[in-house]
Every structure is written in structure tokens, then in C-alpha cells.
Amino acid sequence: MFKRKAKEKKIKTPRFQTFRDAYAVTKQVKPWIGIALVAIFLVTLSIGIGIGIAVDHPFYVGFIFTPLSFLATLLFFTRVAGRAAYSSIEGQMGAGASVLMAIRKGWTTTPAVAVSRNQDMVHRSVGRAGIVLTGEGSPSTLRQLLQDEHKKTERFAPGVPVIEVIVGDGEGQVSLRKLQKHLQKQPKKLTAHQMREVRARLKAVGGLSMPIPKGPMPTRAPKVR
């Protein structure tokens, strides 16, 4: 019994820590988040109580609206926290790598497999879609860096699709906020076995040690059951 409780505590603690970290990051960017969350909860609950009074069952309807109020508050926080997380790392060195490494399912990212003197860098991600080389920095100098890494990657993994991406808000670029979705929507071209083989081949190539902006990064909205 005690072992079971200890196990449950270990499972719940990381989730609470993640939520607390997300709230701390969000509060730095959006100082009003605490008041907004309380307001949304109370407004939603008040609507429920108001409906309950109208149908002559205020306590019953209020009881039903309590979890709905928590849900509305959580959904609002998820959206605001996601935006705040991106805002907190935009412009920092390795921001793209931080976003890519936050994808927990289907992709493995090695940061800074190539870095120029101007601190332009390329990150390598491997998934069912193939290999994605993501560049951060000046587009004019990134092109050559991406081409060189593209040729290098093809030598280690011949025949595997290689996709080039440049992080930015310009034409033909992918913004930091849309980077995760851009990778996840790529069509699958490798089997799970082929993907593991590619990862094993490229593991020996490795990358450079570099600072990654800290803080919880959004992956996707939580499922509601």
C-alpha cells in the first residue's frame, strides 16, 4: 500500500512541477495571468449559478459547472502559456533547438550539428518523414551552411529524404511558433524500423555542446476526457 502511494506521488510530482514552471514563465511575460485565471473561473461558475437560479436548481447546476470552470481556466492558461513560452525564448541562441527538442513523440533532435562563425546554426531532426535540417540565423549565410550539412547527411544516410527549414518570419521561412506543427505535418516516408536505422547511423555524427533556453515548451493542448 505504501509502495503504491509512493509510486503515485512520483508520477504526479513531475506534472505539478511542469505546471508550476509553466506558470512561472507565463507570469514573467504576462504578469496579469493570475488575476485572469481567477476571473475566468469565477465568471464561468457565476454563469452556471445564474442558469441554476433560472431553473430553480442553483446548487445542482453550480456543482456541474465547477469542473467546467476548471476546464475553461485550464484551456485559457494552456493557450496563454504557449504564447508566453515562445515569447520568452524568441531571439535567444538555440531557441529553435529548444522548440524541436520539446517534440516528445516521433522526432529526435540533435542540436547544433553545424555552427558558423556568425553563430548561425543547423539542428538535425530525425522522424518518420526523414531528416529535417533546421537553420537559425541569417538566411543569406544559412543557405551555404544548410547545403554543406545536407551533403554531409546524405553521405551518412543515402536515399533518406532530407528537408531544409529556416526559422524566421520571412517568405519561405517557418516561424518559431509554427516549427513543431511544420515537422509534425510532414508526410511519413520511412517505416519505424528504417527511422531507427537512420537514427543509429547519425548518432555517431553527434552535434556541438550549446546552451539551450530553459523553460517548459508547449507540445500540444492537453486532451480532455
Image (tube, grey):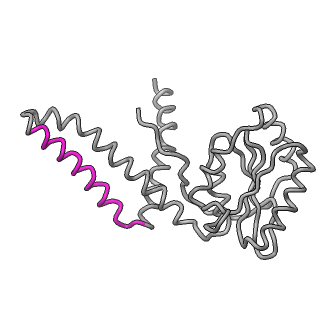
Image quadrant in which you'd find residue 39 = bottom left
Q: Position of residue 69 (x, y in %)?
A: 28, 44
Where is residue 166 shown, x and y percent of the image? 70, 62
Please state which of residues 72 and 178 is positioned toward the viewer in this rendering.
178
x, y (%) of residue 17?
A: 48, 49
Q: Residue furthest front?
A: 171
Which of 18 and 84 lies nearest the eye of the viewer? 84
Relative image position of residue 84 (x, y in whole percent): 47, 62
Name the outermost residue toward the top.
1
Left of 203 or right of it: where is 63? Answer: left
Using the image as rendered, state which of residue 156 and residue 101 is in the foreground. Answer: 156
Q: Is residue 225 left or right of residue 14?
A: left
Quarter of the image that includes the C terminus: top left
Q: Is residue 209 above or below residue 51?
A: below
Q: Is residue 11 left or right of residue 186?
A: left
Q: Residue 22 versus residue 202: which sits nearer the camera?
A: 202
Main SS, magenta residues: helix
Instruction: Read off the magenta span.
Output: 30-53
